[in-house]
Image: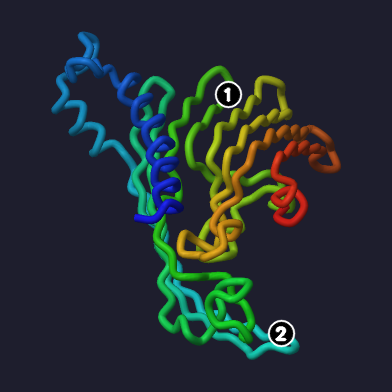
Amino acid sequence: MNMRKSVILKKLRNYMLVPLLAWTLVAGVDVSTGETADYMPKLEDSLSGFIKDGKILLDIRTRFEYASQDGLKSSNAFTIHTRLGYQAPEFKGFVGLIEMENNIPLDSDSYDAYPGSQGYPGKTIIADPRNTEINRAQLSYEGFDTLLTAGRQRIILDNYRFLGNVGWRQNEQTFDGATIINRSIKDLALYYGYLDRANRIFGVEADVEAQRYFEMDSHIINAVYSGCPFGKVGCLRLSAQDRQFAGQFL
């Protein structure tokens, strides 16, 4: 395994361990002994209810796209995108979620999926490459008019313009970090997020690191007031250490 893949897997493992350990603690399991706390049912009963009361997440989308651009050959992309995940039942305000994502091109040589020299240069880009990855792995807590989410998560602010999941492409963009939303004041939503990485739509097989992901050190502040008779009023503040992300991606 090369150094790049080793670093990616190590970071992914760390992001997975945080939600897993947190869920273990809130579920009443003693990490040192593996026994459930006195106030909890037996472990086998808890696991049975955990599976039965959870929610299977499934999204399948088949798409044909034609694209042409002056100076390049036209492209045709026939792709099948699948997202499969599981959302655990709520327990004392906590909810865990994990989701895989896969995109299969049925005719990958008929279009160029990557900017640059990878893929099929000379053809119009359709940014839906072959890809399999963990799309989301998160733990959330909701209470006191507040929602906190940690891990790999989907983020969509306002009308997608400045920060979103690029949902019209077959591979979704997600973010590694922690976010908090508070709605204690009527008609006012206050949002703060710390983002460590953006997992981009070009997938894990892209040769160029900046196409796979952007390493970030970003603070997001967003406020939206919906009590106006003429619509919503909002503001967004993004502080990004990675200026390439802030200048080219958003």
Residue 38, percent across and down?
Answer: 20, 9
Circle 2 sits on which residue?
69
Residue at (68% x, 48% y) in the render: 163
Q: Is residue 116 above or below residue 196?
A: below
Q: What residue type is labelled 1?
A: Thr
Residue 91, percent across and down?
Answer: 36, 24
Check the picture and name the quadrant holding the N terminus: bottom left
Residue 139, percent across and down?
Answer: 43, 32
Label 1 crowd (10 A; few <14 / some 14-19 / many >=20): some
Tell which tag, 2 or 1, sits nearer the viewer. 2
Q: Which amino acid does label 2 sit on?
A: Gln
Residue at (47% x, 30% y) in the render: 140
CA–CA distance between discs 2 and 1? 46 Å
In terms of secondary structure, where does tag 1 sit?
A: strand
- Of label 2 and label 1, which has the lower sequence position? 2
Residue at (59% x, 32% y) in the render: 179
On residue 146, the disc is 1
